[in-house]
Image (spheres, rainbow, N blue to C red):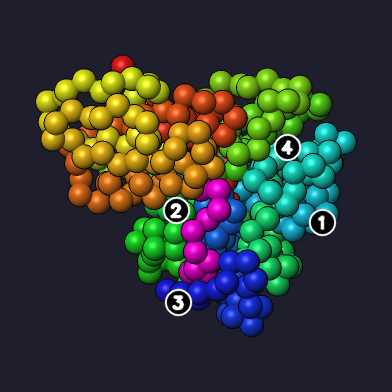
Amino acid sequence: MHTITVDSEDPDREELRPAAEALLGGGLVAFPTETVYGLGALALDPAAAHKIFEAKGRPSDDPLIVHVRPDWDLSGLFLGVSDTIIQLARSHWPGPLTIVATKHPDVPDVVTAGRGTVAVRAPSHPVAAMLLEMVGEPLAAPSANRFSYVSPTLAAHVASDLGEAIDFLVDGGPTPIGIESTIVAVDGDRLSVLRPGSIDLEGVELSLTESKSASPGRMERHYSPRSPTRALAAGVHLESRDAPGVYIGYADSAPPPDGWEFVSLGDRLDLEAVGRRLYGALREVDVSRPSVIVVEYTGRGGLGTAIDDRIRRAAGGQSVY
Ligand code: TXA
Ligand code: MG
């Protein structure tokens, strides 16, 4: 694996060229997006997309998100580009919104895991945007972590998870949002949020489906540390438990029991900062394999809903209370 370090705000095209060429040659390149690092390969080349599953240890029934430039002609990816799709893309792209709709036959089955729908988003991160422009083709890119582990928000996370399995790692520093994109399924003019994220679609007419099968990413025990992890209701005082563990909370959290290590995600009202820190904190804490990691929910709406969704999944749905 070669690492290319770039300026995240103003990447140098020449520095990115070897990575773009590797992608065009069917290789694997990890790069920063505004949400988390992605592991990219040509989406319309089944052999290239297949390599993503091998590198991640990802089951072949878990579909990938296709990344495009915001002005990409969607009629080659979706079968029928409805007004609803156009409106969503126009309002939120480039940005952390993934749109799921009926797929065009040209999208390889390996990308959609054999489903009749495909997930598409246009990232806003300057590095992802420039790579997409240089490659000139859609890129399939799941989060660049080993399957079911915590998503990477730093290049170092990618290197430790995937290291030799990839051709290039583009290091653009910490990812600015830190939580994966909002996923919305479009069926006619009906929208359903499959995964909450920093784009809050609550204002639009939609139903938050609790369907677990609609998106495999809604599975429990996804995005999980290796150490046993439990979620704690917001503002609740953690009672003493058998073995001391690590408590991930906020500046105003009640102190954990004696012997516990406390890690603060900062001010719980500053949800953007909490979102940026969550995955890094989970990975750092997990290194020493504590007997248990307890993570307190933010208990807040908006971005807090997305953060609490990831805390719930990190804990595999298991709460202390
Ligand atoms: O922010 C993000 O979305 C990041 C960056 C790299 O773009 N990507 C990401 O990809 O989170 P991944 O593969 O880790 O998560 C994508 C989720 C998966 O849970 C997958 O099941 C779901 O999207 N998904 C993909 N295609 C789908 C489809 N056709 N229908 C329903 N869910 C789909
Ligand atoms: Mg993922």
Is residue 66 positioned above or below 231 on the image? below
**How packed is label 3: few (under 14 Cα within 10 Å), some, or many (20 or more)?**
some
Asked which quadrant contains residue 272, the reply is: top right
Mark 2 burial class by Cα count in 10 Å: few <14, some 14-19, many 20+: many
Secondary element under disc 3, as helix, strand or loop, is strand
Determine which residue is flagged by label 4: 101
> From where the camera sits, is residue 18 visible?
yes
Residue sitting at 34 percent across and 61 percent down? 160
Distance between mark 4 and mark 1 Cα atoms: 17 Å
Q: Are marks 3 and 4 in contact (CB under 8 Å)?
A: no
- For the point 53% across and 66% down, which residue is it? 172
Q: What kind of element bears circle 1?
A: loop
Q: Which residues are magenta?
A: 169-179
Image location (x, y in percent) of residue 250: 38, 35
At a point 55% along the width and 53% down the height, the residue shown is 176
Quarter holding residue 244: top left
At label 3, which amino acid type do we have? His
Label 1 amino acid? Asp
